[in-house]
């Protein structure tokens, strides 16, 4: 990757752990709130905070949510199959990472 | 533009039934889906397979595609005949959000019809632009020092005539010190443009690391395998260890064993709460390739009386 002098250099905001609200997560991944509620129900996403309005998700959950969207769409998964696939993928990545 | 043989991509006959097409797609999706596949170029393959399926699963699109004839070869230079698709009506067009995933070939055949319909910007209509996301790979050293990286993004955009064109955009981004894989950087207003007076969306950049030749990273912690000699491990020694920010001296305690981990607290990725740096000892065995070395091993054998398999012998 090379630098281009023409374009200005942008400063972004680094998202810290548990910083995204339900609404921000929806908008960030163009997802329906209902889908995210189901992912929380099946513990694919585990936010901090008690009530929905207080939920805070990790920035990594954005990538996780997008993966869940792709898998659901491309393999026509229902929620419990999705939860299983996500869990197995987590384990697989852990194994590959340490292997 | 190059012709694509969608039947060949799915590995089915031209006369294949819809069931066979669906089966072939499902099989190839399991093989090449970028979220599950270990195949090289999985993403490229999956895009091709998805595109082929998008056309062949839909009887109308399939009929239109078949009308082009079977004399074309994959990769052959192709231009659609003037009113080749007259009489076909596409209900779908692009499905989902990744218009950029389709080839020029696909877009020339089906793309415009689908997009132009949804892209009507009526007077007085305002909508916030969508957030977009991209992944950026940086070197571990960038996370220690901070860096500026240039990325290019491709956005599908409607031109004045309602056609979809891919617009390439170059961005320079400051990567602040202390970021780690999986973290996101939010760039306000760098997502898709809004409609009317609507605000532009945000761009979420996900950080990933390029593989490193000597370090491994786990979250904010960084690991290095450090080869040591048997006598350094047994007797203890002061050694020099590379870290992403320079060399450090470290004392190996006497009696260290294979795989022993030594932690340099706070020397991992310098996030708000810094990670740790771990040195993992790997005992390297010197070759017995001279008389002197062989004799030294013999002497050690006599002196040590060491049996590393003692615990296995008790088993039977």
Image (cartoon, rainbow, N blue to C red):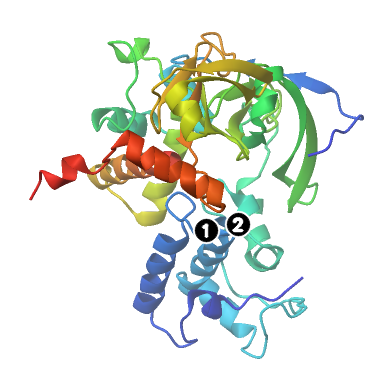
Element on which disc 1 rests:
loop
Query: Observer-nearest residue: A44 or B13?
Result: A44
Sequence-wise first label, 2 or 1: 1
- Disc number for residue B92: 1
Q: Chain of mark 2?
A: B
Element on which disc 2 rests:
helix
Up-down: is B273 above or below B71?
above
Please tell me which residue is depicted at 80% across the width and 47% down the height of the picture: B160
Q: Residues within 10 Å of mark 1 (few under 14, many from 20)?
A: some
* Residue with the most extreme bottom position: B71
Which image quadrant: the C terminus of chain A? top left
Query: Seen in the image, is A58 located left or right of residue A1?
Result: left
Q: How many marks?
A: 2
Asked whether residue B263 appears in the rendered view, the answer is yes
Up-down: is A59 above or below B11?
above
- Disc number for residue B114: 2
Asked whether residue A31 appears in the rendered view, the answer is no
Q: Which quadrant of the figure has residue B200?
A: top right
Query: Observer-nearest residue: B109 or B152?
Result: B152
Please tell me which residue is depicted at 44% across the width and 47% down the height of the picture: A70
Please tell me which residue is depicted at 29% across the width and 27% down the height of the picture: A40
- The picture places residue A48, in percent across and down from the top left corner, at 34, 14
Whether pointer 2 and pointer 1 mark residues with C-beta atoms closer than 8 Å, the reply is: yes
- The picture places residue B30, in percent across and down from the top left corner, at 39, 61
- The picture places residue B253, in percent across and down from the top left corner, at 45, 17
Q: Chain of mark 1?
A: B
Up-down: is B255 above or below B299?
above
Which image quadrant: the N terminus of chain A? top right
Query: Observer-nearest residue: B11 or B239?
Result: B239
Up-down: is B180 above or below B156?
above
- The picture places residue B190, in percent across and down from the top left corner, at 70, 27
């Amino acid at each position: 990757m090379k630098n281009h002098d023409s374009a200005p250099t942008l400063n972004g905001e680094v998202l810290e752990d548990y910083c995204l609200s339900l609404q921000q997560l929806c908008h960030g991944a163009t997802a329906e709130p209902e889908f995210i509620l189901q992912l929380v129900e099946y513990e694919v996403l585990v936010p901090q905070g008690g009530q929905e309005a207080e939920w805070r998700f990790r920035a990594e959950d954005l990538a996780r949510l997008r993966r869940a969207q792709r898998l659901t769409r491309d393999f026509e998964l229902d929620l419990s199959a999705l939860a299983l696939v996500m869990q197995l993928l987590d384990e697989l990545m852990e194994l590959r990472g340490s292997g | 533009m190059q012709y694509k043989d969608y039947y060949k991509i799915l590995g089915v006959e031209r006369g294949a039934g819809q069931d066979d097409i669906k089966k072939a797609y499902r099989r190839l999706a399991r093989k090449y889906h970028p979220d599950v596949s270990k195949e090289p170029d999985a993403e490229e393959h999956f895009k091709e397979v998805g595109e082929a399926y998008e056309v062949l699963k839909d009887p109308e699109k399939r009929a239109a595609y078949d009308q082009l004839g079977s004399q074309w070869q994959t990769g052959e230079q192709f231009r659609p005949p003037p009113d080749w698709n007259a009489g076909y009506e596409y209900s779908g067009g692009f499905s989902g959000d990744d218009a950029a995933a389709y080839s020029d070939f696909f877009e020339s055949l089906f793309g415009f019809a689908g997009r132009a319909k949804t892209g009507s910007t009526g007077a007085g209509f305002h909508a916030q632009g969508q957030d977009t996301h991209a992944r950026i790979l940086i070197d571990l050293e960038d996370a220690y020092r901070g860096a500026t990286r240039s990325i290019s993004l491709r956005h599908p955009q409607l031109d004045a005539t309602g056609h979809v064109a891919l617009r390439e955009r170059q961005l320079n981004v400051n990567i602040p010190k202390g970021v780690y894989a999986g973290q996101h950087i939010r760039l306000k207003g760098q997502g898709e443009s809004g409609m009317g007076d609507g605000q532009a969306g945000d761009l979420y950049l996900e950080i990933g690391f390029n593989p490193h030749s000597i370090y491994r990273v786990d979250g904010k912690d960084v690991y290095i395998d450090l080869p040591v000699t048997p006598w350094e491990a047994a007797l203890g020694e002061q050694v020099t260890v590379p870290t992403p920010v320079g060399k450090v001296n470290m004392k190996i305690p006497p009696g260290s064993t294979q795989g022993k981990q030594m932690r340099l607290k706070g020397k991992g990725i310098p996030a708000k709460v810094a990670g740790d740096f771990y040195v993992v000892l790997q005992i390297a065995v010197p070759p017995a390739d001279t008389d002197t070395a062989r004799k030294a091993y013999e002497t050690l054998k006599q002196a040590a009386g060491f049996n590393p398999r003692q615990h296995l012998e008790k088993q039977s």
